Image (spheres, rainbow, N blue to C red):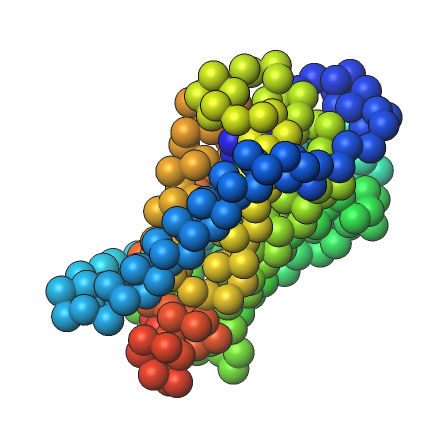
Amino acid sequence: MFGHEVYVLSPGQISADKHEAKVNVWRALGSAHNQRLFAAFFVGITASLLLALWLKLRPSFKRLGAFIDKAGYFAPDLIRVVFGASLIFSARHQAVFGPELPIDSFSFHQFIGPFLCLSGIFLILGLATRWWAILTTLFWLFTFADRGWYMLTYINYLGEALALILLPRQNFSLDRLLLRGRPRRFAYQKWALPATRILLGFALLYAAINVKFVTTALSLDVVNRYHLTHYFPFDPLFVVLGAGLVELLIAALYLLGLLNRLNSLIFIGFIVSSILFFKEAVWPHYLLLGLAAGIFLDKPDFLSLDARLFRGAKSRSKLK
């Protein structure tokens, strides 16, 4: 269950669930049956991760990885364009990053829509990329000051903006056309992909902890309203716990930079499944899908465990 609860529940349901008595998700392990299920899933997932790590050392998988590495050339442009499109769709739906954050609920709301449209257009075109990335960074900080800690749910937007500041070089952009193909290098550009990956992982981590473990009633409501136990034949609270732990695992793998490509495929699969099943609004997920696809295509960055364990201490990432 990877549905964003704020996307599939009404504001009234969300408010009611938040004011319910606190639900302890760990009560799902109160029965011996659920404890055995938990142990079986733990062993199965651990074995799968170890198998994936072993396969990465096999020559055939190394060749496959080298083949995918070639597509990393397109990763910076893909992430930039998806970022710009996400901002435009936010403006079109009169919301900041997600439908639960209507533009008119923010200070200076009359300027937010035009800013999101302009920044999105310029980023898609790749024109003055670094300057618009700086402005979107300042905009995220503004939303954080206005809305508080909740904006950590969308800190992946900050990660994307920082990445474009650190790496304004794009292969398909008006900036490069105007420079007539001359390469541009900046002192800290090797930190661009780590910023994207780590802040995406942090956003997923924060959302999982906040929704699945702190306000568990929200997730439990989704399980019951959508009859998810018909598809996952377990106790409702056990379904919530399982979803939360899987989200934490995906977030942790992104933070560590371990099994980036496998993790991205699984993450994309869950997002698409969630959209199709819950009939969620698609636009808030564009950036998540774009970031996951970009991380899948690009070579491991120099801070990732993938680079250190499987490529040596020195990364060969395109973002260096």
Query: Which residue is more in the foreground, 4 or 194?
Result: 4
The quadrant in which the C terminus is found is bottom left
Check the image and report above or below for 280 versus 303: above
Query: Which residue is more in the foreground, 191 or 307?
Result: 307
Q: Could you say where residue 211 lies in the image, as x and y percent from the top left?
A: 69, 38
- Specify whether 151 is left or right of 320: right
Residue at (18%, 69%) from the top-left corner?
58
Query: Which residue is more in the foreground, 222 or 131?
Result: 222
Quadrant position of residue 4: top right
Check the image and report above or below for 241 versus 291: above
Residue at (74%, 54%) from the top-left corner?
141
Q: Could you say where residue 16 lies in the image, as x and y percent from the top left?
A: 81, 20
Q: Could you tell me if residue 298 is visible in this image?
A: no
Q: Residue furthest bottom?
A: 313
Q: Residue furthest front?
A: 32
Query: Which residue is more in the foreground, 315 or 219?
Result: 219
Residue at (79%, 48%) from the top-left corner?
149
Q: Could you tell me if residue 16 is visible in this image?
A: yes
Q: Could you say where residue 164 lies in the image, as x and y percent from the top left?
A: 51, 61
Check the image and report above or below for 267 versus 196: above
Residue at (82%, 32%) from the top-left corner?
22
Check the image and report above or below for 238 versus 183: above
Q: Could you say where residue 180 lies in the image, as x and y percent from the top left?
A: 32, 67
- Specify whether 182 is left or right of 129: left
The mark total stands at 0
